[in-house]
Image (cartoon, rainbow, N blue to C red):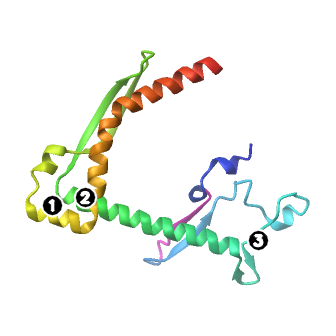
Amino acid sequence: MDRAALHPPYVRFILAEDPTSAGRLTLCVERASDRVVDQLLAPSRDDKILPFFTGNEPTEATKQALAFCNQFQIDFRATREMVEKIDAHGLFSPRQSKVTLEGGEVLNLTDFQVIDEPAFNRLSDEAFLDLRKSGALGLLYCHLASTNSWTSLVHQASLRKAAGAKSA
C-alpha cells in the first residue's frame, strides 16, 4: 500500500512559522512521501506528475495544498482561542482513567483534560454569557454529553480487540 495514502494531507503538507519573520508562514513538504516526487526523477512513473510550480507560478496542486494548510491554520488558531477561553473560566480538570476491556486487558489513559461539570454549573451569569457569545457553549455541551459514551467506547474497543484476535 502507498505509504502516503495512510497519512492525511496535513502530515504531508504543513505551514510552519518562519522564525526570522513574525507571522510569515512557509509551506513545508514531506519529501519522503511517495506522492511527492522530483519531476526529473520520475518520468516513467505511471501516476500523473504534478509539479509544485510552472515557472515562478504555483500550480493548482500547490494552491490546493496552500489553501488546505491555510484553513488548517485558521481552524487551529480558533481551537486554541476556544481552549484558552474555556481555560480562563477554570473549567478544565485533569484526569486519568484505567479502563478494563471485556477480555480483561487494562488500558491506562493519562494526561487528558475534561470539562468539570460542577465547575461549569457554578459559572456566573456573566461567565456563561461570555462563553455563549464566544461560541463555546455548543462545544461544552457536546463534550459533557460525550462523557456518557465511555461505556460504549470500552465496549467497542473490546469488540475490536476480540475481532483482531480472531483474525490473527
Rounded to the nearest angstrom, the CA distance separating label 2 from label 3 is: 44 Å
- Answer whether labels 2 and 3 touch (C-beta < 8 Å): no
Q: Looking at the image, is 70 positioned above or below residue 57?
A: above
User: Would you identify the image quadrant in which residue 76 lies?
Assistant: bottom left
Residue indicated by mark 1: 128
Amino acid type at mark 3: Pro
Residue drawn at point x = 28 percent, y = 65 percent: 135
Amino acid type at mark 2: Leu
On whether residue 15 falls in the magenta region, the answer is yes
The 10 Å Cα crowd at callout 1, few under 14, some 14 to 19, many 20 or more, is: some
- Residue 164 place in picture, x, y as percent: 59, 23
- Residue found at the very far top of the displayed protein: 104
The quarter of the rendered structure image containing the C terminus is top right
Residue drawn at point x = 74 percent, y = 47 percent: 2
- Residue 124 place in picture, x, y as percent: 8, 59
Element at label 1: helix
Start and end of the magenta stretch?
A: 12-20
Rounded to the nearest angstrom, the CA distance separating label 3 from label 1 is: 51 Å
Residue in front for this viewpoint, 17 or 69? 69
* 112 lies left or right of 90: right
Tag on residue 51? 3
**Pair 2/3: label in front:** 2
Residue indicated by mark 2: 137
The 10 Å Cα crowd at callout 3, few under 14, some 14 to 19, many 20 or more, is: some
Amino acid type at mark 1: Phe
- Residue 147 place in picture, x, y as percent: 30, 39
- Answer whether labels 1 and 2 touch (C-beta < 8 Å): yes
